[in-house]
Image: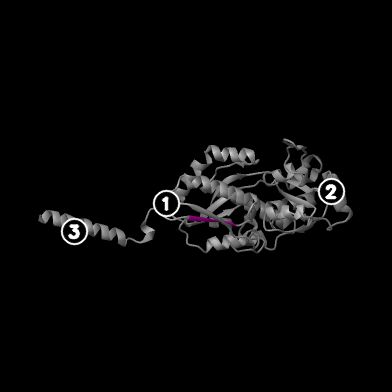
Amino acid sequence: MNRILTLTACLAGLFAVGLAQPADAQTYPFRDITTAVVWGAGGGTDSINRMIMAEMEKELPVGITVINKTGGVAGSNGMVYVLNQPADGYTLVGLSESNVTAAVQGGWSNRFNTWHPFIVGGSPDLISVSADAPYNTLEELIAAAKANPGTIPAAASGSGSIHHLNLLAIEKGAGAKFKFIPYKGSGPSHEAAINGEVQVVVTSLAEQQALLAGGKLKPLAMLVPQDTKLEGIGTIKSAFAMYDGLDKYLPLKQAIGFAVHASASDEVKQKLTAAFNTAMQSDKVREWADKNFYDLSGQSGTEASAIFSNLESTFAWTLWELKAAKVDPGTLGIPKP
């Protein structure tokens, strides 16, 4: 009887000790995760994060909620928000290659190595015009922009985004000048073009394809070396064949995904990586990518960090060369590409 009482007392003691353990000692993740996307709802970064998080949820014992934290410079508001949360893996940041320009544009003072990134993939950019715009070719648009510099309104997501950089590259390579109007993401840029606020829009094929198919936008040229054939639309010619100077600045490739604090624990990084890798191999992700004109990547950690480091150098120094950066990349320790 005494042995039974002693065993019962020991078990009760162990149970009490277990209850007294702090929450941090529990296995990650034990509560829901939030992903704060730095760009607006409906854009490429938002869509990719909602898709991949839904797949990663299947591999984790908790749910993942996706929210939008827009504004600032090159997505700086969202990055600052997540950076100010504990580095415990419960607040992720949904981001893209465009966020690497936040520092050179004065949005914050951190390098991109603040993050431990995961890259889902990206889609090529193209330049289109509103359905009622009086331009049917890129040559016609460029001629009009040259005739009246800085008067044709153009949307290309936020300042310093890859879409903005592509617009700057078109200007530089073709010798034209548009009136750039920044918006909080690709979705608002499209709405501006459809509503007549702007005539020109530069975003990705994945983001524009439904609007192109619906006749809401007219495609003028792809901003990659290859032509692209779309069912029901026809072939969209490459701008490279039209202007020799573009190849000095293009193409710039998307890298869309999410990140956790670089200072997060190895356990957090390993659990997220395992869920990410499994999700990336799922049929649903592959089908989604094919349907939406995305090239899948799947890099994470050191490999993804190296890609973003190269993008940071390329984007920062391109902006500086095009006189579109506020801060000298050299003062931030960003090496030349």
**What span is in magenta?**
33-37
The mark that comes first in sequence, 3 or 2, is: 3
How many C-alpha atoms fall within 10 Å of the one at disc 2: few (<14), some, or many (≥20)? many
Distance of label 1 from label 2 (alpha carbons)? 53 Å
Q: Secondary structure at mark 1?
A: helix
* Residue nearest the viewer, comparing 317 with 8: 8
Position of the N terminus, as image quadrant, is bottom left
Count of all numbered marks drawn on residues in the image: 3
Q: CB of mark 1 within 8 Å of CB of mark 2?
A: no
128 or 222: nearer the viewer? 128
Give the labeled residue for mark 2.
Answer: 141
Q: Is residue 291 visible?
A: yes
Looking at the rendered image, the disc whose residue lies closer to the viewer, 1 or 3, is 3
Expressed as whole percent of the image width and height from the top left, the position of residue 222 reads 74, 42
Q: Earlier in the sequence, mark 1 or mark 3?
A: 3
Residue 146: x percent and y percent?
87, 53
Kindly state the secondary structure of the residue where label 3 is placed: helix
Q: In the drawing, what numbered circle is on residue 9?
A: 3
Where in the figure is residue 301, as x and y percent of width and height? 51, 48
Hey, which quadrant is residue 74 in on the image?
Answer: bottom right
